[in-house]
Image (cartoon, coloured by chain):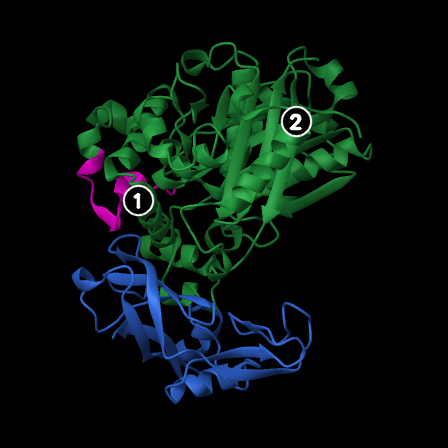
Amino acid sequence: MSQKEYSYAMDIYPQEHGEETRLWSFFDNLKQGKLTTTKCNKCGHIFWPPEVVCPQCLSDDLEYVDMPKRGRIYAFTVQVGAIPSGFEPPLVHAIIDFENGIRIISPLVDTKPEEVKVGDEVELKVVSIPPDSHGDRVLFFFKKV
Amino acid sequence: MRKVVLVAGGVNKWGRRAATFRQLVAEAGKACFDSNPNISNKDVQGFILSTAYAERTGVQIHPAPFMAQTLGIHPTKLYQRVENQCGSGTTAIRTAWWAIASGYIDMVMCVGAEKLLIPSHSEIFFNASAACDKEWEGCFGVNPPSLFAMAAQAHMRKYGTTEEQLALVALKNHTHALKTPYAHHYESYQKRGKVTLETIMKSKPIAYPLKLFDCCTNTDGAAACILASEEKAKELTDKPVYLIGTSQICAHGSWTLAHKDWSEWPPLRMAAKQAYEMAGIKPEEVDLAEVHDCFTISEIIETEEFGWCKKGEGGKFVEEGLSDYGGKVVVNPRGGLIACGHPFGATGIAQAYEIFLQLRGEAGERQVWDAKIALNHNLSGLGEHHIIVYKKGFD
């Protein structure tokens, strides 16, 4: 079994490709530099995390909508211990609030830990993560504006 | 609904154990049967195994039948494994409660166990991330230390809670565990002396503002208890401990969907109110509480949401000694998750066992004077709470 096949079941990252997930468009959008989420065409609910059924009205008539370009830090931490395998400290985790009411928890990159403050504005930074057997993978990190 | 009673309990030695998951279960199960000579393993009709990581660190998929077999139990009415991460133990006891209260079964054994200290330390924290919303949150390496650190930051910002107040929770709980021989850290107190405020304040940073001593300890451990109907309990013991109130809430899964202000825990407030109402008691009637101090900040917020002090004054509450012996409510008399360690599936059951001892007046040097009512709380996230209230004696 190759390392890539092993990672399918055991690594921490999401399955992002059409062969593995019905939410592949979310990851395709992300690869093009766009953070999106799912909106319900029946009840209008825009929600996070993306799903294939609306958690409000259970409709499966959904579309992808763009997330606001920038968010603000509600809280953050610089994690240097209890680091999971595959990650390197320091990890600057942040709780980020967007004006559409959505909250995302994601790490900051390209940002010095000592320069982070509550209330700081951040923007998307797409980062490559290890590929799986179906190809490249990316995730939505953020950086200070 | 029939009344339900705790009639036996036991724990094994917690720590870095040279023993398998199954052997941990055997030790705690034996201790539980040894606590009540009127109960034989042949009498137990129901068996519930509580474990969160059995598949990843145990290592055993479908562990319940093997663990029942190890204890010579052959369930004829009920057997299952329950998993609710850190709240698995209280979940097991609640499940046994319903089965007995309904009249379906007379006696159920709950055993909780976890083998966490596997050779690769970073894999332990990998598992902690995988137990968060893996696809959308855990994939970034975020795990409970970083998440509770952000709750601490929110509480410090809003209420002025200090790092020293956090440290005082750890100091209190490590001091309690000086009298708890099964605690993970017990031997280190003998070898290195007791934990001081300075040790805690100078311990290495984990996730700002949380330091090593603000965090509970991953450990290998097991615990067991037996519940019976009131009628059956009268044949088995003259010192029963009644289950009188409970609640459970799951306000969210993903942490991004928790309430917005992390210094407030409204789901816990709601669950506490429900449990108090069912038990017919007021917050001030609780003599001792086994609450979920997975991190020091958790205990501070919990003392507020349970109504033992005003919202925002949890830091002051511990500072003034009001959560210690001689205070308003003795919080975590055995030393909590911080000093005993936190073998997830075993924790809630070990807390119930502590309450069993306390309400029977059998807690030795840890005894809370004249304890009549005790509360047990586990959490599995900011919005996931499990509460059980216990009362002493045949009433």
Q: Confirm whether residue A134 shows in the render.
A: no
Residue hosting label 2: B279
The span picked out in magenta is: B200-218
Residue name at image x 31 percent, y 32 percent: B170
In the image, residue A104 lies at what x, y percent? Answer: 42, 67
Instruction: Tell me which corner region of the image, top left, top right, bottom left or bottom right, holds residue B166.
Output: top left
Q: Which chain is green?
A: B
**Position of residue B323 in the picture relative to residue B133 (left or right):** left
In the displayed structure image, the side of residue B134 where residue B117 appears, left or right: left
**Residue B275 vertical position relative to residue A103 in the rendered view, above or below:** above
Q: Residue furthest bottom?
A: A32
- Kindly identify which residue carries mark 1: B156
Q: Residue at x 42, y 38 (%)?
A: B301
Q: CA distance from mark 1 to mark 2?
A: 33 Å
Residue for point 42% across, 54% down: B128
Horizontal arrangement in the rendering, residue A1 relative to residue B50 (left or right): left
